[in-house]
Amino acid sequence: MLNVRTQIIIAILVALGFIYIITLIRHKKLEIRLSLIWFLAGSVILLFDLFPSLMTELSGVLGIYAPVNMLFFFGFLFSMIIIFYLTVTVSRQSLQIRNLTQELAIIKAALDEKRGNVKKDDGNRDGDRGDADQRDDDPIEATDPSYSRKEKSRG
């Protein structure tokens, strides 16, 4: 059993955690859907803090010898759920980034073709487009086709 002083400290820490999460949400640094799991975890911790006998009874019902073992098991399970969710999120965002990159390349190629900046295919298949890459890096040349590299080197 926890003494009253420890229970108060835990309750204060959980309350400060809730305030911090709310602050992150208000400043748009944390999405509401992602914060729900942290609110749930804090609520469970607060519930076990306010009613410590509940943890002992629950561990007995689940057949776990010591309440501390149950607490570590649930902490491990919580960590695994968070890691799995983050892995799925990273994978989904990686696919989105690849799709957006491909769409951007298609749009850029179409824009170059419309502006007349596309060099004829010289049979080079290694991704080197010759002067086309250099033209994309030069903002003046990209907007003014009459501007040439020779003028740039003189000026």
Image (tube, rainbow, N blue to C red):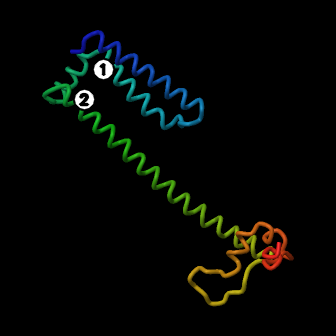
- Mark 1 closeness class: few <14, some 14–19, many ≥20 residues within 10 Å: some
**Residue 149 in the image, given as x and y percentages of width and height:** 78, 77
**139 displayed left or right of 20:** right
Q: Is residue 59 above or below residue 53?
A: below
Q: Which mark is residue 100?
A: none
Q: Which residue lies under the disc numbered 2? A: 71
Residue 108 lies, in percent from the top left, at: 70, 69
Q: Can you name the residue that lies furthest to the left here?
A: 65
Residues at marks 1 and 2 touching, judged by CB atoms closer than 8 Å: yes
Asked if 46 appears above or below 90 in the picture, the reply is above
Residue at (24% x, 22% y) in the render: 55
Q: Residue at point 29% right, 9% down?
A: 4
**Helix, strand or loop for disc 1:** helix
**Among numbered discs 1 and 2, the one appearing first in the sequence:** 1
Q: CA distance from mark 1 to mark 2?
A: 10 Å
53 or 140, nearer to the observer: 140
Other residues around mark 2 within 10 Å, as few (<14) / some (14–19) / many (≥20): some
Q: Nearer the viewer, residue 68 or 60?
A: 68
**Residue 94, position in %: x, y?**
50, 58
User: Is 54 left or right of 28, judged from the image as shown?
Assistant: left
Q: Which residue is mark 1?
A: 48
User: Which quadrant, please, contains the C terminus?
Assistant: bottom right
Say which quadrant the N terminus sits in.
top left
**SS assignment at label 2:** helix
